[in-house]
Amino acid sequence: MDQSNQRTFNFNAGPSALPLEVLEKAQKELVNFRGTGMSIMEMSHRSAPFEDIHNGAISRLRKLYSIPDNYEVLFLQGGASLQFSMIPMNFLKIGQQAGYIMTGSWSEKALEEAKLFGEPYEVASTKSNSYRNIPTLEELQFHLDDAYVHVTSNNTIYGTQWSVFPDTGEIPLIADMSSDIMSKPIDISKFGMIYAGAQKNLGPSGVTVVIVRKDLLVKANEEIPTILKYSTHVDGNSLYNTPPTFGIYMLGEVLNWVEEKGGLEVIAKNNEVKAKVIYDAIDNSNGFYTGHATLESRSLMNITFRVADESLEKLFLSEAKEVGFVGLNGHRSVGGCRASTYNAVPLEACQALSDFMVQFQNKHN
C-alpha cells in the first residue's frame, strides 16, 4: 500500500482509479466552486459556470483526439449498455442488416439488443476459443449494404484488445471503446461512431461519451422516443435533460490531466510500460501464472490470468488484498485474476503487483 497518501493499489475494472491530482482538486472545489458559493453539484446546468465546464470538456476532448468538424460530441447517460439499444434504434431499419464482431460478453449484449430492431448478424466470433483472441482481419466478411459494423475495442472480462481496426469502407464502423478510450491516439475519421462509459479512463460512472459523424444523424430513424434520438441531444448540446453535472466536471478535469501529462502519445507509452511489467511476471513464471489472452490479442488495459495451481488462486487473491491490492478478482462470469491498468493506475502500482507475483511464486513453487 502507498503509505504516503494512504491509498490502495487500485486495479478495479470500473469504476476504477482516478488521477489523484484530479481527486484532490475536486476536493478543494467541492463546497465552494471557484467563488460561486455553491458546489458544482448544486448549481444549475443552465448556469454560466456550468456552461463553461461543459463546453470546456467538449473542447478538450476534441483537441486531444483531433476530432474533425463533421463529428458531434455528446455527453449522455445510461452507460454503454443504453447505447446497445440506441444504436440500432437510430441506425438500423426494419429488415436491414448490421454486422457484429463477437469478442466477448459486451458484444454479445450489444447483438441481443440489436435483434429487437433489425437483422444483425455475427461477422466473426472467437467464442469457441473462450474469447482468447481477436478475429484476424482476413476472417471478416461484411455485407455491402450493412447499416453499420459494430466492434468492441477492448474486452474487460477476457483481456483482449484490437490493435488494428477493420477497414469497413463505406460501411460505418461503430466502436464501443468504454475500456480503452483515451488510452492511446486513434484516427476518429475511421469510425462512424465511438461510444464509451466514462468509468474506466474518463472519470466517474454516470457519463457516456458519444462521438458520432453528422451524416449518420441525417439518415437516422425518426419514429423513436425523443430522448433516445441522438439528434435531440445534438440540438440541445447534451442539455436536453439535466445532465450528470459533477461527472462532466470530473471528466473535464481528467482530460485536463491527460493534457498536462503530455497528451495521448505519452499516455500510450506509459500504458505499454505498465502492462509489460505485469505481463513479464506472467511470461517469466514458467507456467506458474497463465495468461488468458493470446499474445497478439493482449489488452494493455485489462490483464487477465490464472494461477496454474487453482488451489493457490484464492490464497493469491487473499494475500494480495491483505497487502493493499484491490480489484484483482476476475469477472464473476469467468473467475481467475485480472489487473486493470487504466490511465490513472501508476507505474508504481504495476511494479508492486509484479513484485508480489514473483514473491508469491517463489514462496509456493
Image (cartoon, grey):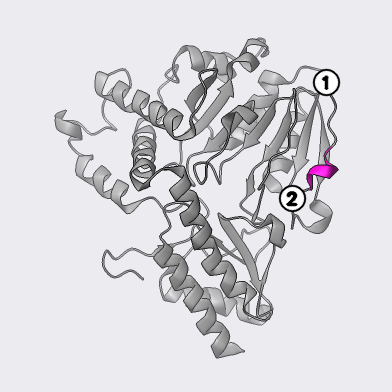
Residue 78 lies in the magenta stretch: no
- Does residue 43 sit above or below 64 in this rendering? above
- Residue at left 76%, top 36%? 100
- Residue at left 57%, top 74%? 281
Residue type at tag 1? Asp
Determine which quarter of the picture holds residue 160.
bottom right
User: Along the polypeptide, which appears first: circle 2 or circle 1?
Assistant: 2
Neighbor class of circle 2 (other Cα within 10 Å; few <14, some 14-19, many 20+) is many
Tell me if residue 78 can be seen.
yes
Mark 1 and mark 2 in contact (Cβ < 8 Å)? no
- Does residue 294 sit above or below 259 in this rendering? below
In three-dimensional space, the C-alpha distance between marks 2 and 1, rounded to whole angstroms, equals: 24 Å
- Give the total number of marks visible in the rendering: 2
- Residue at left 55%, top 46%? 180
Q: At which x and y percent is residue 314?
A: 59, 76
Q: Viewed as shown, does residue 145 lie left or right of 24?
A: right
Question: Which is nearer the eye, 179 or 222?
Answer: 179
Quadrant holding the N terminus = bottom left
Quadrant holding the C terminus = bottom right
The residue under label 2 is 134
Q: Viewed as shown, does residue 23 lie left or right of 163?
A: left
Residue 137 lies in the magenta stretch: yes
Which residues lie in the magenta part? 136-140
Neighbor class of circle 1 (other Cα within 10 Å; few <14, some 14-19, many 20+) is few
Identify the element where label 2 is drawn.
Answer: loop
Q: Which mark is residue 145?
A: 1
